Image (tube, rainbow, N blue to C red):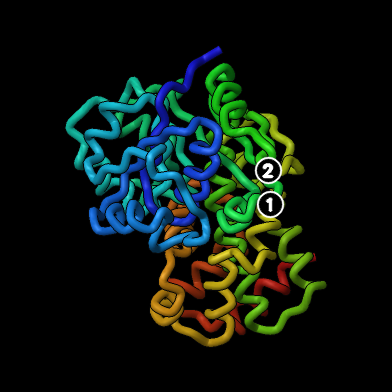
Amino acid sequence: MFDCGKIAIIGGGSWATAIAKIVVGNTHHIGWYMRRDDRIEDFKRLGHNPAYLTAVHFNTDEIEFTSDINKIVQNYDTLIFVTPSPYLKNHLKKLKVRIRDKFIITAIKGIVPDDNLVCSEYFHEIMDVPYDNLACIGGPSHAEEVALERLSYLTIGCSDTDKADAFAKLISGRFIKTKTSSDVIGIEYSSVLKNVYAIAAGICSGLKYGDNFQSVLMANALQEMARFLQSAHPIERRMEDSVYIGDLLVTGYSNFSRNRTFGSMIGKGYSVKSAQIEMEMIAEGYFGTKCMKEINRHMHVNMPILDAVYNILYERISPEIEIKLLTDSFR
């Protein structure tokens, strides 16, 4: 079986911290790249991430921290990228060492802006990493519940089944169950779209639409997602698998969902800027909405929910008007 070797985390947010908890709990050593030296020093002093999931304590003797991304890439074999998608390019621009021979795992639920590529496509097309060396982590899972050791299910996507199986086995444990898939592109796109649909769910909640309508919204969102995935990456897939519908539901309904929270604030009358400032965390769906809209201009898939969210966030159309038009399109 493939050996994942030494594993490093690249990113310092909630999901990065949750994944670090899983990996170091099973391997007892990780490398961890964080951009800010002051955060690293605080982490070492406190024994936990000073900014995210502060209740999760680590044995820092099991962690090699660094703010030098080149050192991490040089010294580690498997690199798990967990940065916000808008910042990925800036991190990679710092690289001076070869990355194509590393096993790259993306846990980034977003699209690289401007290039409008999901992360595996970006690593392949821009960083020259072979698809066999690329994997992704799919949900449904919230970082907060992983931190609380609540039972969670993850899907590892990779075209190389040996690598997918090896990493899935490595992170499996008492509160993490895993399965594998070859649908890397489909998992990544669905991870982007479910954030868009969670914003829609939040907007509708903010507008006081009830549970009956929310269920219809989610049903239509799944159909919309299926149409896009089949157009973008036409393979046989089961949309009822947890990595698709499960991730959609947990992001659309959970109080831990920052995208739903962001949407709810928009529905209650906040401006986009005001909602972003008050949240103090990135809602990936905001950026994903624009990227997906631009991608779909060329694909012409029927995506009324995406269009409605885009119109509200970027065209400043009234949420009341836009959602009313959306409800008329549902059956």
Residue displayed at 62% across by 50% down: 141
Residue displayed at 65% across by 83% down: 207
* Residue named by callout 1: 150
- The amino acid type of the residue labelled 1 equals Arg
Tell me if 71 is positioned left or right of 276 in this view: left
Real-space Cα separation, disc 1 to disc 2, in angstroms: 6 Å
Q: Nearer the viewer, residue 320 or 268?
A: 268
Cβ–Cβ below 8 Å for labels 1 and 2? yes
- Residue 48: horizontal and vertical position, in percent? 43, 55
Q: Nearer the viewer, residue 194 or 19?
A: 19
- Residue 39: horizontal and vertical position, in percent? 30, 57
- Residue 213, quarter of picture: bottom right
Q: Secondary structure at mark 2?
A: loop
The residue most toward the top is 1
Q: Is residue 319 visible?
A: yes
| Res. 1 mark | none
- Residue 240, quarter of picture: top right
- Residue 253: horizontal and vertical position, in percent? 69, 65
Q: Is residue 208 above or below residue 248?
A: below
Which quadrant does the C terminus fall into? bottom right
- Residue 21: horizontal and vertical position, in percent? 51, 45
- The amino acid type of the residue labelled 2 equals Phe
